[in-house]
């Protein structure tokens, strides 16, 4: 199916989870556009931030890990509360103000650089603030989509978002590498800050029914526990969540090691590093294009497991790349496989979670799982930065491949293998 199917006439006839009529077809188009624009900005930052930290601020390996972890730490502190309040509040305003907050916190980085005041601790503080807004923003984003499209279109809608994100990851890093070369890494970060302002304006223009029941007997602790029970006691979501947490820890280690290996050990330029990330993005685009079809063919659970099995292979190749003359070629192949797996997996995983979770719990379940994911990524980034100085690039990448394999095995030895999820 093409992208028009998501926002086409069928959307108006099929009820969303929760029993309410879906939003007008223009609502998803604006939501999709907002996500696309911010994705391009984020892809530029994915190149600019490592260059700023590694080459301009001359950070130590531990400081590289600290910066990588900073934007994820707020998930550990605020995640449970963000989920509960996302289910209490209307989600569209949360999206808008979270994007404005991220724009301000990210935009402060080039300002500090221009006045000669930027230091690692300031960067960490701003990324902590950025992460705090992101906690609420992503909890609302993942819970808002089922209000815009019907249940039968959730895999397609998530795939369209993933395709756009993958396209941004394909073109954005090359654009980011060029902007870094032309303007410098700090100024390139302004592109991402501006993208969040546009994101906020587009989401503010969405017209959708959002009513929240006002109750006097609400108890924050009870609501948090209810969300945790659904996320971790559910026969399918529970093991999938644990597998995903392990995956995020491995990915946190991997990205820290990757930036040091490519930019320092292998001497990649900012543009070459951008091309490396662009290859991952282009393969994610291919994976997302076929995500719904593969999910329908194999079943949504087996599709997720198949994708999880591809990651350890990818990072085993990266480990080999760290010790051979053809390192750059193998590293590009490894990131291509990593991107392909992510493109296939993400739409199916998100659709599974959005389908089996009641709308009144979506904010909590999404925020709870994402909070632990980001906490695991933060710990992984710190662990990767601290350990690489002790054992070197190659053995750290071997460890990454092993941890990714554990994530795949947790998913395999679970009821997820038989999960298909009816689209109706």
Image (cartoon, rainbow, N blue to C red):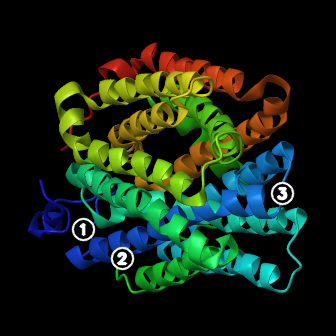
Graded by Cα atoms within 10 Å as few (under 14), some (14 to 19) or many (20 or more), the crowding at tag 1 reads some
- Residue 20 in the image: state x and y as whole percent: 28, 65
Seen at 46% across and 13% down, the residue is 413
Q: Which of pointers 3 and 1 lies earlier in the amino acid sequence?
A: 1
Q: Quickly name the residue at label 1.
A: 21
Q: Quadrant of the C terminus?
A: top left
Where is residue 274 drawn, in percent x and y?
A: 51, 56
Residue beneath disc 2? 209
Task: Report if the CB atoms under discs 2 and 1 are less than 8 Å apart.
Answer: yes
**Mark 3 vs 1: CB contact within 8 A:** no
Task: Tell me the residue at 50%/15% (across/down).
Answer: 409
User: In the image, residue 322 lies at what x, y percent?
Assistant: 62, 28
Q: Quadrant of residue 384?
A: top right
Query: Is residue 212 at least partly visible in the picture?
Result: no
Residue 50 visible, this angle: yes
Whichever of callouts 2 and 1 sits on the residue coming sooner in the sequence is 1
Residue annotated with mark 3: 58
User: Residue shown at 19%/62% (left/top)?
Assistant: 6
How dense is the environment of label 3, judged by Cα within 10 Å: few (below 14), some, or many (20 and up)? few
């Amino acid at each position: 199916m093409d992208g028009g199917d998501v926002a086409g006439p069928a959307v108006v006839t099929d009820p969303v989870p929760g029993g309410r009529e879906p939003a007008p077809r223009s609502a998803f188009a604006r939501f999709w556009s907002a996500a696309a624009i911010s994705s391009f900005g984020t892809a530029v930052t994915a190149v600019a931030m490592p260059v700023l930290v590694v080459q301009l601020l001359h950070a130590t390996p531990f400081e590289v890990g600290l910066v990588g972890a900073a934007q994820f730490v707020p998930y550990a502190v605020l995640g449970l509360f963000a989920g509960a309040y996302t289910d209490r509040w209307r989600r569209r305003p949360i999206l808008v103000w979270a994007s404005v907050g991220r724009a301000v916190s990210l935009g402060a980085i080039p300002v500090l650089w221009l006045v000669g005041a930027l230091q690692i601790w300031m960067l960490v503080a701003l990324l902590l603030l950025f992460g705090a807004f992101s906690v609420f923003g992503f909890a609302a984003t993942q819970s808002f989509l089922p209000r815009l499209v019907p249940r039968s279109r959730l895999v397609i809608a998530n795939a369209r978002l993933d395709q756009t994100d993958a396209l941004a990851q394909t073109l954005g890093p090359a654009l980011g590498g060029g902007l870094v070369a032309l303007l410098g890494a700090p100024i390139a970060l302004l592109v991402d800050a501006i993208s969040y302002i546009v994101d906020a304006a587009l989401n503010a223009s969405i017209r959708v029914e959002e009513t929240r029941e006002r109750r006097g007997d609400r108890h924050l602790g009870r609501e948090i526990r209810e969300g945790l029970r659904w996320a971790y006691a559910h026969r399918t979501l529970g093991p999938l969540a644990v597998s995903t947490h392990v995956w995020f820890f491995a990915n946190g280690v991997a990205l820290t090691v990757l930036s040091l290996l490519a930019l320092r050990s292998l001497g990649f330029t900012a543009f070459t590093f951008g091309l490396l990330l662009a290859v991952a993005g282009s393969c994610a685009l291919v994976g997302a294009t076929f995500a719904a079809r593969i999910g329908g063919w194999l079943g949504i659970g087996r599709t997720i497991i198949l994708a999880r099995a591809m990651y350890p292979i990818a990072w085993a190749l990266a480990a080999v790349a760290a010790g051979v003359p053809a390192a750059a070629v193998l590293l590009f192949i490894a990131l291509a496989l990593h991107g392909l797996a992510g493109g296939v997996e993400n739409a199916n995983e998100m659709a599974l979670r959005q389908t089996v979770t009641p709308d009144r719990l979506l904010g909590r379940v999404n925020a709870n799982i994402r909070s632990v994911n980001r906490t695991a990524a933060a710990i992984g980034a710190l662990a990767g930065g601290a350990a690489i100085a002790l054992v070197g690039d190659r053995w750290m990448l071997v460890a990454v491949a092993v941890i990714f394999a554990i994530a795949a095995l947790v998913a395999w030895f679970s009821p997820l293998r038989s999960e298909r999820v009816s689209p109706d």
